Amino acid sequence: MTLSRRAVLGAGLALSACDHRELSLTAPSHLPPLKDVAQFPVGTCVRSDFLADPAYAALVEAQVSQVTPEWEMKMEYIVGDDGAFRFDAPDKIAAFAKAKGIRLFGHTLVWYIQKPKGFLNLDEAKTPFATAYRNYITTVVGRYRGQVVGWDVVNEAVADEGDGWRDSLWSQKLGKLEHMTLAFHHAREADPDAVLFLNDFYLELKPKKRAEFLRLAEALLKAGAPLTGLGTQTHCGPELPPGAIKAALADIASLGLPIHISEMDVSPARARGLFKSRAELEAGQARVYAEAAEAFSQLPARQRFAFTHWGLRDKDSWLKHEDPTDTPLMFDDQGRPKACAAAWERGLR
Ligand code: XIL
């Protein structure tokens, strides 16, 4: 007798669903603030315009001890088409963090996706590319020296499937590894204290990509780059196999450097095509968050740099642009804690 694909999948789901029964799926009426339950800094990404909303600002202040500018500390915001820099928005975020006694994390200096016209239109006869590159990094890092606790110096350098390192404007102009070692040296020159990170995504989903990420980290260290932290973004889904995050963190921790879970969200919408009911998607989401909390908590204290959620309220998530019905974060649109937030906190204990 041949089983239909749906029957095979259905059987699999039935089994996987029973794994989640022990997870309470009711939203908690009250939950201690995320930062009060964790034995490490808890962060979120923020946008300067959102901070003008008192309810949003109050939620950030109550729940986290670190903030990452979601996009306003990237080249796409700072570098004008004429090469001039603007800092009004990141300065607002820095001022908010300072006023609230919240740590500030810098994101991100060099990213393959960003190639602003200010660099593309550079008159290299007047200003060599390497000079403009160094000037950008030392100016941005130097501006927030003494406040930023860490920087994503290089973001998403490993190819999607782990087959080597990405090509980019930066690699073409300055060399595949060289542009990265230079970025770390320039950042260290501008700030002697900030933790300097290599950051990437899908390290929990793709072991081959994770292996290449660690090879790149070792190559940077061998080349003398002041790489002093590893960031794993952890944008994932409820279908992520149990144990995947635990295995990834153990691997990444093997280099002995501080680790930043830098951008976590768990997207039910991205898993919707897997024949899962809403209840199963939410149970899977709670399980994944709980595993991440537990695995991160089990790292040595010196390696627990911070755990950053890529947003707090569902409605603020970048994933809403992909699917407006997505609910990937810890809090609902009204800022109330969800079942996955309770699961995350339980995972810390
Ligand atoms: C995203 C922001 O959330 C969006 O608002 C922006 O439009 C695009 O970038 N990995 C990263 C982050 O390192 O910088 C990305 O943030 C999400 C994926």
Image: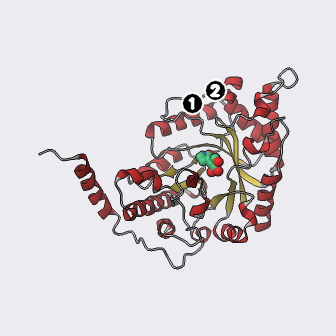
The residue positioned 57% from the left and 75% from the top of the image is 32
Position of residue 158 measured from the top left corner of the image (x, y, whole percent): 56, 35
Q: In the rendered structure, which amino acid carries the disc numbered 2?
A: Lys
Residue 337, percent from left and from top:
54, 71
Furthest toward the top, the residue is 125
Q: Who is closer to the viewer here, 104 or 259?
A: 104
Q: Nearer the viewer, residue 199 or 77?
A: 77
Answer whether residue 288 is visible to the viewer in this image. yes
Q: Is residue 7 left or right of residue 225?
A: left
Q: Position of residue 228 (x, y in %)?
A: 65, 44
Residue 213 in the image: state x and y as whole percent. Answer: 54, 37
Q: Is residue 92 left or right of residue 242?
A: right
Residue at figure coordinates x 80%, y 36% from the top left: 81
Mark 2 surroundings: few (<14), some (14-19) or many (≥20) residues within 10 A: some
Callout 1 touching callout 2 (CB < 8 Å) = yes
What separation in Å lies between label 1 and label 2 (alpha carbons)?
Answer: 7 Å
Tag 2 or tag 1, which sits nearer the N-term? 1
The residue lying at 60 percent from left, 53 percent from top is 318
Report the residue marked by disc 1. 165
Q: Give the vertical position of 298 relative to 187 (above or below).
A: below
Q: Quadrant of the N terminus?
A: top left
Query: Assess mark 2: CB under 8 A from ligand 1?
Result: no
Q: How is the image coloured?
A: secondary structure
Q: Which residue is mark 2?
A: 176
Q: Is residue 125 left or right of residue 237?
A: right
User: Neighbour class for label 1 at 10 Å: few (<14), some, many (≥20)?
Assistant: some
